[in-house]
Amino acid sequence: MPDPTVCVAGGGPAGVMLGLLLARAGIRVTVLEKHADFLRDFRGDTVHPSTLEVLAELGLADRLEQIPHQRLVRAGFEHAGRRVDILDLRHLRVRHPYIALVPQWDFLELLAAAASAYPEFELRRQAEAYDLVVEHGRVVGVRVRDRSGGHGSDGGDYTLRAALTVAADGRHSTLRRAAGLTSRAFGAPMDVVWFRLPWAEGDSAAQALTFRFGPGRAAVTIPRRTYWQIAYLIRKGGFDDLRAQGIDALRRGLAQTVPFLADRVGELTSFDDTSVLEVRMDRLRRWYRPGMLAIGDASHAMSPVAGVGINLAVQDAVAAANLLVPALREAQRSGVPVPDRVLAAVQHRRQLPTAVTQAVQRTVQTIGLDRTLRADPDSSPPGILPAWLAPVLRRPMSRFVGLGVRPEHVRTWPD
């Protein structure tokens, strides 16, 4: 295969979706994934109606249905023994009025398999883009560290040239740092300890996704097919303190916050059973430089609030493909560089939805989570939302979480 027209660094939702969309439009694209597979635990698994609509437009809805998953239509919080729904997706007038809980590795394999049907698509696993190749101020490719042995001959390192390089390598993006792109950081009051506990007889998925809180602690319980996925929220930078207190401290805090799980917290044998997400929220001031574009978490790290990260990344990919294909076809045909104005158009299209989403997340963090996590553990549980306000917010919040600020739709390109 000749050098690709587009090199995408990062095999996450943004990178693989963009690769699929570009190959579908006849653009030669190589996606570099530094790992041998997509199997990473506690990644974002919530596929929202906006993404389900994209899959339907690509003819992949039936394939998704074949992957074992759950559907969530409600989400809310529990306070003083009372449950209050803040989300009810059944109100949405869309084909898929629910959130599909799909393991992210299955979701990515679905996209990669669909993309592989196009000869223009290539996925190189165990291939990490670790630096940019710049000529006369323009990015013309990447330096790749290849552990597969399938490409290159210089000790596993080689150069991959492309008309456009796309950084989709996550919130700790190597390429955005190499490009000198600067971000605005917004901070977050919490980190998240992820783990799972077994399903027990009598548990019901009808309990839905629920946020439970008490003074100084909070937890989100997510029903999966055979287990509960738990997001245990702690103060920012507080994991070392929690670990120093021992695993019993985590067990006690969870049992007090989620009483119905108290009989199985002993399943947590050590902190090796957990995974820690250091929450960060930022947004690049400029998402591009000549020959390079950043999308997904590489351009805007999102808070886990509302679980919209994977869906925002997919929306970025759809918008990028819609705007880039004409210029990429010209670059592929005649070697004309992709104009900066086209890259700027992608940022312009996606910056507002990103900013609004982050503003909502910051509001939730400031008004609800920060207050909860700073509360004295011996005090009364703080209130988060007046009960009368929940019905008022339910429809707008359902639309915000389910569809986002500016839903994108897949374009069909003529041959």
Image (tube, rainbow, N blue to C red):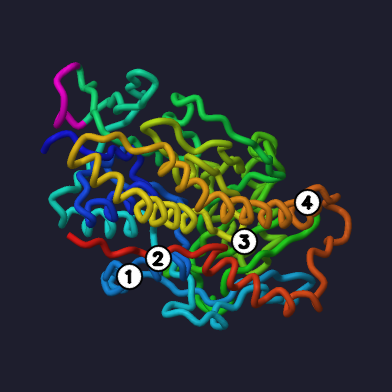
* Labels 1 & 2 near each other (Cβ < 8 A): yes
User: How much space separates mark 1 and mark 3, taking CA atoms?
Assistant: 32 Å
Residue 190 sits above or below residue 150 on the image: below
Say whether disc 2 or disc 4 marks the residue closer to the N-terminus: 4
Residue sitting at x 33%, y 72%: 56
Residue sitting at x 57%, y 63%: 405
Residue that carries the numbered disc 1 in the rendered image? 57
Write down the region rendered in magenta. 148-154
Residue 34 sits above or below residue 94 on the image: above
Which amino acid does the dot numbered 1 rest on?
A: Glu
Circle 1 or circle 4, nearest the eye: 1
User: Magenta stretch: residue 286 in it?
Assistant: no
User: How much space separates mark 1 and mark 2, taking CA atoms?
Assistant: 8 Å
Residue that carries the numbered disc 2 in the rendered image? 409
Residue sitting at x 27%, y 60%: 110
Say whether disc 2 or disc 3 marks the residue closer to the N-terminus: 3
